Amino acid sequence: MPTEPETEYDPELGRKFIFVTGGVMSGLGKGITAASTGRLLKNAGFDVTAVKIDPYLNVDAGTMNPFQHGEVYVLKDGGEVDLDLGNYERFLDEDMTFDHNITTGKTYQHVIENERAGDYLGKTVQIIPHITDDIKRRIREAATGNDVCIIEVGGTVGDIEGMPYLEALRQFAHEEDDDDILFAHVTLVPYSKNGEQKTKPTQHSVKELRSIGLQPDILVGRCEDKLDIDTREKIALFCDVPTEAVFSNPDVADIYHVPLIVEEEGLDEYVMKQLDIASEALPPEQRENRWRELVTQETTGEVNIALVGKYDLEDAYMSVHESLKHAGLETNVEVTVDWVDSDEMSDHHTDRLHDADAIIVPGGFGSRGTQGKIEAIRYARDRDVPFLGLCLGFQMAVVEFARNVLGLEGAHSAELDEDTPHPVIDILPEQYEVEDMGGTMRLGAHETDIKPGTLAHELYSSTSCTERHRHRYEVNPEYIDRLEAEGMTFSGRADNRMEILELPDHPYFIGTQFHPEFRSRPTRASPPFVGLVEAVLDAQTADSAAETGVSH
Ligand code: GLN
C-alpha cells in the first residue's frame, strides 16, 4: 500500500544537491550553465545526474507543441520530456529516465490518485505537506546512486506555478546538512545606455528568493561580457554572499564552450569546496580532458546541410542540430545548417537546395509542408545528394519512392491522407484502439536487427543497434516486396517493422524510423549523422580530384 511519501534521509540516496533557480527572465540559459558545471564535476571523477523541474500542468512534454516549446525530447525509457533533459544527457553523457523530469501535472496526478485510493486516511490533502513531500521524494529518488544531483527549477522566481517547488526546496534545505546542498541563482545583468553593468534586477530577484526563505550561495550573472569586479562586489554586498561566490556567464558563440568558461571562472572548484568534496576530486592533471580537446580543435573543412522542416522555432529541431555538430566534431569539419522551410518548396521549387551539400528531412506530425519534403527527397535521390530521413523523413522517403519509382499514384501515409489509394505508411496495429494522446506512441529505446553487408551495417559496425522511437505509423508490410524489388533495401528491421531504409545505388541515402539524434553526444556522435558528413567529404574529395585531373 502506498504510504505517505518518505522524507527521512537515506544514505543510499544522492549525497549532494545543487539547486539552480533563475531570476529576472526566462531563457537565460541556466540549464546550460548547470549542465556545464555538471560536466566539470564529472571530469573531476564524480557521478553526476540532473533533474529538470517544469512547473506546468502538463503531465509530460509529449502533448506540447514543439513550435511553441521546442522539441519533445525522448528518453530511453520512452519518457517524453523537456528539451533541457537533452542538454543534460549531452553534457553529462548520462542516460536519464522519465523520473528526471518533474512536472506539476505528474505530481498532482500522483497525489490525487493516492487521495482517491484513500491513502491519506481521512486527512485534508494540501500543497504543504502532500505536494511538497512528493516533490522532495522525487528529487531524492532521481538522485539515487549519484555523488551529485543538479536540480534545475524551470521558470523564474516569483512565478505562481513555481511556488510549491521553492517551498519544497526550503524544506529540503532544512532537512539536509548545510554542506550537502547548494543554491545557485542565475540572473540577468544588463548594460545601461552608458555601458554600465546594472545589478538592480539581480538585487530584486534575490530579495524575492529571500522572502520565500531561500538564500542563494552562488550568483551567476548572465551578461554580454564578464562581470566587472565592481559589479561582482556590489552584487555580493546586496545579496549577502562573498564576492568570490559571484560568477560571470558571458555570451559565447557555441554552447559547448560554456564548460570552459565555467572552469576559467572557477565555479566548479567553488562548488566542490562548498559541498566539501574538493578533497575527493581528481587532481587537475588527471581530469578527463576529451571535451576540451574536441571543442577547441581546428576544423579542416566545411559542410553545409539543408534541414528541411517547418520553421517557426529552430528549437523544434534542437537534437538534430546538435547531432550535426557532434558529427562535425568527430570528422573535424565545421557543419553549417541551412534551415529550409518545406513550405517554400512545393511544385519542384527546389532552388533553395542548390547550395546544400546534403539534405536532412527530420521528424514531424501533420501534413503541413509534406509536399516540400517529398520534393526535397526526390531532389536528393535524383541528383545523388547525400540524404538522411528521420522518422517522418524516413516515411516520406518511402512515399516518394512509391510514387516516383513504383508509379503508385497518390501513394501516401495514412496519417496525412486518410483516403490514399496506396497507404504505404500505415498506422501501427497496436495503435488502432488508442484514444489518449499522452504517452501512447511507440516510444523509447527498441532494438533493430541490421542486415550484414549493408550501409547501416557499415555505419553501426554491428548487426544491431538500439535507438529511441516516437511514432504511430510505420511501413505497411503489404508494400515491402514491391519497394525492395525496385531497389529500396530495408536494412534494419525489428521483427516485421521496417526500421532503416537505404538505396544501394546512391552514394548516401538512408532513412530511419527511429530518432538517432536522441542518442548523439559530443563525445559519441551518432553513426547516421557521421555517415552523412563523411559522404559529403568523400564527394568533395572526388570533386577536387576530378578538377585536378582536368587541369593537368
Ligand atoms: N507522424 C509520424 C508518426 O507518427 C512520424 C513521427 C515522427 O516523426 N516522430 O509515425
Image (cartoon, rainbow, N blue to C red):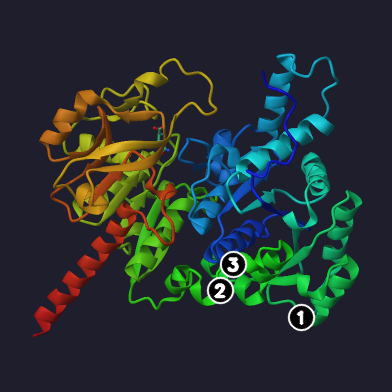
Q: Which residue is mark 3?
A: 281
Residue 400 visible, this orientation: no
Instruction: Tell me the element at label 1.
Output: loop
Q: Which mark is residue 283?
A: 2
Residue 430 at x, y percent in the picture: 39, 20
- Marks 3/2 in contact by CB < 8 Å: the verdict is yes
Q: Residues within 10 Å of mark 1 (few under 14, many from 20)?
A: few
Mark 2 close to ligand 1, CB under 8 Å: no
Could you tell me the amino acid type at mark 3?
Answer: Ala
Q: Which mark is residue 17?
A: none
Residue furthest out toward the bottom = 552
Could you tell me the amino acid type at mark 2?
Answer: Pro
Residue 65 at x, y percent in the picture: 56, 39
Residue at horizontal 58 percent and vertical 68 percent from the top: 258
Residue at horizontal 56 percent and vertical 41 percent from the top: 81
Q: Quadrant of the N terminus?
A: top right
Instruction: Reply above or below: 90 against 218.
Output: above
Residue at horizontal 63 percent and vertical 56 percent from the top: 31
Closer-to-camera residue (223/342): 223
Closer-to-camera residue (13/515): 13
Q: Which residue is mark 1?
A: 228
Marker count (numbered): 3
